[in-house]
Amino acid sequence: MQKQAIIVGAGLVGSLWSVLLAKRGYEVNVYELRDDPRKAGFRGGRSINLAMSERGWKAIEKAGIRTKIEQVAIPMHGRKMHDTEGELSFQAYGEEGQAIYSVSRGGLNIELINIGDEYDNLTYHFGYKCKGIQLETNTAIFEDVDTNERIEVNAPLIFGTDGAFSAVRRSIMKQDRFNYSQQYLEYGYKELHIPPTSDGQHLIDKNALHIWPRGQFMMIALPNVDGSFTGTLFLPFEGQSPSFEELHSDEEVLSFFKKYFPDSIPLLPELLEDFRENPTSGLVTVRCNPWHYKKQVLIIGDASHAIVPFYGQGMNAGFEDCTILDDMMETYDEDWSKIIEAFGDSRPQDADAIADLALRNFVEMRDLVADPMFLLRKEIAAHLHEKYPSDFLPLYSQVTFSHIPYHQALEEGKAQDALFEQILAIEGIEENWSTNPLVDQIFQKWLKKKES
Amino acid sequence: MQKQAIIVGAGLVGSLWSVLLAKRGYEVNVYELRDDPRKAGFRGGRSINLAMSERGWKAIEKAGIRTKIEQVAIPMHGRKMHDTEGELSFQAYGEEGQAIYSVSRGGLNIELINIGDEYDNLTYHFGYKCKGIQLETNTAIFEDVDTNERIEVNAPLIFGTDGAFSAVRRSIMKQDRFNYSQQYLEYGYKELHIPPTSDGQHLIDKNALHIWPRGQFMMIALPNVDGSFTGTLFLPFEGQSPSFEELHSDEEVLSFFKKYFPDSIPLLPELLEDFRENPTSGLVTVRCNPWHYKKQVLIIGDASHAIVPFYGQGMNAGFEDCTILDDMMETYDEDWSKIIEAFGDSRPQDADAIADLALRNFVEMRDLVADPMFLLRKEIAAHLHEKYPSDFLPLYSQVTFSHIPYHQALEEGKAQDALFEQILAIEGIEENWSTNPLVDQIFQKWLKKKES
């Protein structure tokens, strides 16, 4: 087979994957609907940031730009919760020194494209809209968005990295027996800008992910390198109170923020303008199977598994697709029929698991982080991990700070739920958890059962 | 609003719904991809039959053709199970006199179109392929399949009754926040013809639905009026044994039938030819929400809720959509904004429920009907119903012989599962169920709890 590939979509996963393929000597042609972000400016600009964690870093390292990205990534060591009185509390994500990193989507995308440009065997074609794939002939059809000219290109391998509304997936979907699901949350989100101080500093602690948990809804904020934060309000679209449909006039918006997020008002000088002008967007989970057509056309990243953002794993999961495929190129000696079969057999269950985990984490972020019993559980979990580092790793750490397959992490998480149901039922546990021998006894019994 | 409607698709649900609308004085234009079945012959011909039950009859009655259809419907009073020795057993579907009815899809469709033709305000347009709906203008776009001419028609109401692969649904799906899922079983099906005797009689009992239950797979047969039966083999596509991928040569097919369905071989003189020539088809469940666009474009029947055939409820559920809408036209005095809102709020949960029930029933048909404990449960259920007719109606009867909303039936079914878990755990229940007072005690306790 000739070492040639077409990649549809030069977003984060597409631009990373094209670099990894180019590194291995493939002739790669990447087609992207948007203009070159280095010339046009990244659409979405300042307002989109991401939480990079261990799985993402591994792929970034493979691409050779870890050091570069680290310089513009802001470590967030934990969650900082804001209550309605403006009181703050903090909950670490992992051990001392562990963090997730706020990075700019646009900045990261541009770095990946820059790296790709260094390869003579990698060519970007910007301004081409994918009109679908002729599956029988491995031909991708594009339309030049300026001239409307239609072009057809083919290659032995086509990768769809064209996101949650993938045109490549739409072509595969026309085949018989394609399982597909797209499910929207009843919630929308709206981005709100927290500017820097006049001397470019962050107004609130920059080394944390800020959460205003309010039970059925929440606001969060992630730091940007320019001293600003991107705030995001997650709220039901309608049918509940409060909801976006209730917030129309400036007065309604302001009184909502005064009631629920009073300490955020000084941080949001452009609140009313942002609220009026920024869109209210939806949150979708996409699952499908199979991810490929005859082991020649493969969809990865959001194209095959879009998830909600609440575990900070969307990009990380897409990047991990690339890592796994890159590793499989060695394992299977670049036999793509074997690679795509193995990947297609194993990876969807991990994508399913992180989709479920991300949905679960919404409840955790908007509600449970304000629940004393939940915080107690986190404390005891950290304690057990410290005492039995090789026997107990909290679920959040498995997802965020390890490369344990997501579906294993999800299973382990369910087992941990059963463990803590017992531990938190101990009489007086709030006071005596660090000394009560029952905690250890229950843990040992649980461990024994799990290992048997 | 002008009383005008476009209906996309003149299959069973579309042709029934067009009659009900025409009866209420609407100017109805129905567009159908296929040729007029009265001229062209019904595609699929003899080989497709359906099980009409109570919900279907009610709609047929509204259309005014109940008597006509009853004359060509064959009552099936229960399941007749064939074991590998050719031994038969029988299990009634309901009470004495109750039955489901085998009807021909083509015959029923033609009768509905004939009735429609009697209305001056109803026009059929055959040979028009729907290319989608311009939602903002309520315009349906069709292509004349002979001339390729494109036409656009609009009306204040558009109904999509164009089946599991609905073009109308595809247009609605492009809107934001549309939840959608299509899931295929790992099983395929293949139709096999059981001819009549030389004097036009049925070779086996015509008043039963025949099942050859074999655990992981099964064959069934439904009677046709010409003395033949339509047999259907349901088998995994691949990855298990036996499966369709293992059955290629005539020898493989024959030895499979000899091993698992020996008593069917004399019934299937065209077995090898049928097996080679008939397609192996997939079985899909489609769920989506919302079912409408701005209360003006509505999808019903398989277009919004395609289900697997194992409860015999696909057509019945689609017909019940029509009954409910027709009733709502009275309730809401033909205010379509209110009708479609009320229908869209309530009906999807019933469609979801029957989709789940149909998937569950596959296990029942292929496996449980051969299980003595399952048959015992059916017997005790019939006994309880006889003793407490107003307090206990078996799940199957709720679905098949009542108009209880499907989602209520599903809930009731789960409650009945809990009841029988207790009853079947009684010591010696196989022998003493008709006399043991514990049965009554458990039932009364269950009933009390359910009613509280």
Image: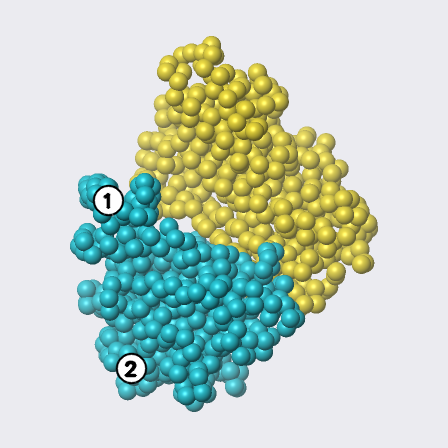
Chain colours: A cyan, B yellow
Q: For mark 2, give the secondary structure.
A: helix
Query: Which residue type carries mark 1?
Result: Asn
| Chain letter of the residue beneath label 1 in the structure image | A
In percent of width and height, residue B440 lies at 50, 16
Relative to B319, say whether B96 is above or below.
Answer: above
Q: Are marks 2 and 1 on the same chain?
A: yes
Q: Nearer the viewer, mark 2 or mark 1?
A: 1
Mark 2 in CB contact with mark 1 (< 8 angstroms): no
Above or below: residue B408 compared with residue B19: above
Residue B199 in sight in this render: no
Front one among A313 and B271: A313
Disc 2 crowd rating (10 Å Cα; few below 14, some 14-19, many 20+) is few
Q: Is residue B254 left or right of residue A237?
A: left
- Label 1 neighbour load within 10 Å: few <14, some 14-19, many 20+: some
Q: Please give left or right for residue A266 compared with residue A291 in the image.
A: right
Q: Say which residue appears at 47% left-offset and 35% top-offset.
A: B361
Residue type beneath disc 2: Gln
Determine whether the residue tagged by mark 1 lies in a helix, strand or loop. Answer: loop
For disc 2, the chain is A
Q: Looking at the image, can residue A381 be seen?
A: yes
Q: Quadrant of the N terminus of chain B?
A: bottom right
Q: Report the residue marked by disc 2.
A: A71
Q: Nearer the viewer, residue B289 or B205?
A: B289
What residue appears at the point 62 percent right and 31 percent down from the top-left corner? B402
Q: Which residue is mark 1?
A: A436
